[in-house]
Image (cartoon, rainbow, N blue to C red):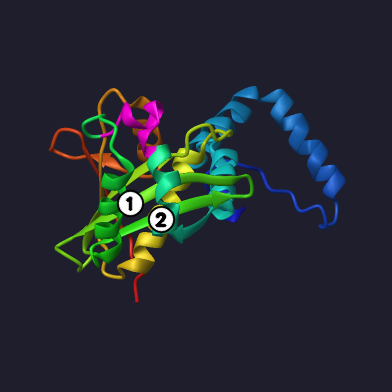
Amino acid sequence: MAAAQARGAVLAIDPLAPGFAIHLREAIQDFLATPERLQAMTQAALGVCDGKGAARVADALQVGALALRAATLDDAAALHAWRNAPETRVHSGDGLAITLEQHQQWMQGVMASPAQRLWIAFAASGPIGVLRFDSSPYGTGTTAEISVYRVPGQPGRGWGRALIARGVQEAQHAWPSLMRVDARISSDNLASLGAFTACGFEASAAHGLYQKNIERPRS
C-alpha cells in the first residue's frame, strides 16, 4: 500500500487511526473539488496494475485443479481415439489418421526414451488433455519441445493455458536442468497462439517457433 501511495496510485487512510471519519470526509471533498487529482490517481493506478488480476487468479486455480500422470500402454486405445479425432488432427503435423498398432508402437518408443515424457492431464470432470515433451540434447533436458492437445468433447474454457502451464511445471521437475521450452505453432491455430503467448511464450526468429525461458530461483 505504501508503495502504491508513493506512486500516487492510492490515497491510504488508516481506519484505525484517530480522526479517520474526518480525514475520509476531507479526502472525498478534495476529490470532488479537484477532479483532475482523481483522474491523475486513476492514471497512476493503471500504471501499477493492468487489471488482469482476476484472470490470473482464474488461471492459477485451473492449473492447480489439474493432475498429471504418465501415460501407459493401457491408455493406448483412448489416446489413439483422441489423437485421430478430426479436431485434433486439423493442427497436427501431417493431419493423417494412424492405426492403433502404429500408435502403440509410437507409445512404446516414447515411454522407453529418457528424452521424452507423455502425460495425461485430469480435472475433476475427467481427462482434459495430453502433453508430450521431447528434451534435447538427448536426455539432458536443457531444452524441451512441448506438444499438447485437448481431449475432444471435454467441456470448459481456458484449459489450454492451464495445460501448458501445468506441463511446464512438470517438465521442470522431470529435467531439473531445463532452461527453455519450445513450441511449434501453426499461424492459423489462433487458439494455441493465444494460449501459449498467455503462458509467456514468445516468437523466435524461426518461423512458427515460440519459446519460453525458464526462470530459476536465485540461490
**Residue drawn at x 35%, y 61% as measured from the top left:** 171
Element carrying mark 1? strand
- Residue 179 image offset from top left, x and y in percent: 25, 61
Residue 141 lies, with reference to residue 88, above or below; the image says: below
- Residue 194 image offset from top left, x and y in percent: 38, 32
Q: Quadrant of residue 219?
A: bottom left
How far apart in space, not on screen, are marks 2 and 1 (Cα)? Answer: 6 Å
**Residue drawn at x 23%, y 63% as measured from the top left:** 115
Amino acid tagged 1: Arg
The residue stretch that appears in magenta = 83-92
Amino acid tagged 2: Trp
In the rendered picture of this protein, how many numbered marks are placed on residues?
2
Q: Residue furthest front?
A: 101
Tag 2 and tag 1, C-beta contact below 8 Å: yes
Between 139 and 203, the residue placed more toward the observer is 139
30 relative position to 208: left or right? right
**What secondary structure characterizes most of the magenta part?**
helix
Q: Earlier in the sequence, mark 2 or mark 1?
A: 2
Q: Residues within 10 Å of mark 1 (few under 14, many from 20)?
A: many
Task: Give the numbered dot on residue 119.
Answer: 2
- Residue 47 image offset from top left, x and y in percent: 47, 37
40 relative position to 199: left or right? right
Q: Which residue is mark 1?
A: 132
